Image: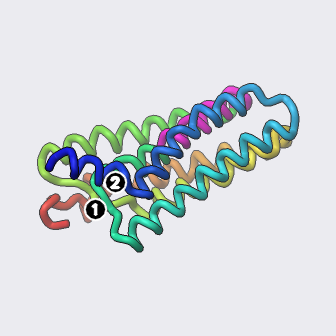
Amino acid sequence: MFIKNWKKEIFTIPNLLSLFRLVLIPVYASVYLAATESYQFLLAGAILAVSCLTDMIDGKIARKFNMITTLGKVLDPLADKLTQLTLTICLSMKYPVLYPVLGLFVLKELFQLVLGVVFLRKGKMLPGALMAGKICTTVLFISLIALVLMPNMHPAAVTLIAVIDALFLSISFISYVLAYFGKHVKVQDIESE
């Protein structure tokens, strides 16, 4: 019975798409870091576009066909966060002005991970991603993919992107701090979901 449920958890279309996104991460990194020509940067951008497209599709399929699984609730955000982290690391190597963005991203994600585990052990968790987090993710993906596709972007534009990304990351970070500790705490008992 356990093996049957285990297979059912993994072998859903949304979970397979999330696993595919995880596989795309080292492919993107190797293509981007070796890129010297425009078409190579475009290829790296195309890989990211496929990743974003599968991210949108897996959620829609999971909801429409009732394929939401516990594994999927872990795999989907894991694929998102690892893709964002890899993208930010790779771009920071080319654009050092992005190092503060990378640092803020890592700090925010570690905060969410640690608090998530602490509250999970107490039988509590956030009911889902906060709107500020979703907006931040969208802004990060759009701006960072623009940097991948336009490798000769003017340094002032790169700096502007770094400032915008840092601003949205800060707003998201503060939103999560308030969700855990603010006046209107959003953490709920797991049973109440």
Q: Taking 1 as reference, is 160 left or right? A: right
Q: Is residue 94 magenta?
A: yes
Residue 180 locus on image (x, y percent): 27, 53
Left or right, 155 with respect to 50, comes to right
Q: Secondary structure at mark 1?
A: loop
Q: For mark 2, give the secondary structure.
A: helix
Q: Residue at x 84, y 29 (%)?
A: 36
Q: From which residue to which does the magenta span run?
A: 81-96
Of tags 2 and 1, the one toward the viewer is 2
Q: Residue at point 59% right, 50% down?
A: 51
Judge whether residue 166 can be spotted in this image. Answer: yes
| Mark carried by residue 31 | none
Residue located beneath label 2 in the image: 73
Q: Name the residue type under label 2.
A: Lys
Report the amino acid beneath label 1.
Pro
- Mark closest to the chain's N terminus, 2 or 1: 2
Residue 174, position as x, y percentages in the image: 41, 52
Q: Is residue 130 left or right of residue 20?
A: left
Q: Which residue is nearer to you in this view: 167 or 54? A: 54
Q: Is most of the magenta stretch helix, strand or loop?
A: helix
Q: Work out whether residue 176 can be spotted.
A: no
Q: For residue 93, what is the image quadrant?
A: top right
- Using the image as rendered, state which of residue 143 and residue 46 is in the foreground: 46
* Left or right, 121 with reference to 6: left
Q: Answer few, some or many: residues within 10 Å of disc 2's Cα (few below 14, many 20 plus, some between 14 and 19).
A: few
Cα–Cα span, label 2 and label 1 = 11 Å
Q: Which residue is more in the foreground, 88 or 65?
A: 65
Label placed on residue 127: 1
User: Where is residue 108 drawn, in percent x and y?
Assistant: 43, 42
Q: Position of residue 56 (x, y in %)?
A: 53, 62
Vertical placement of 71 versus 101: above or below? Answer: below
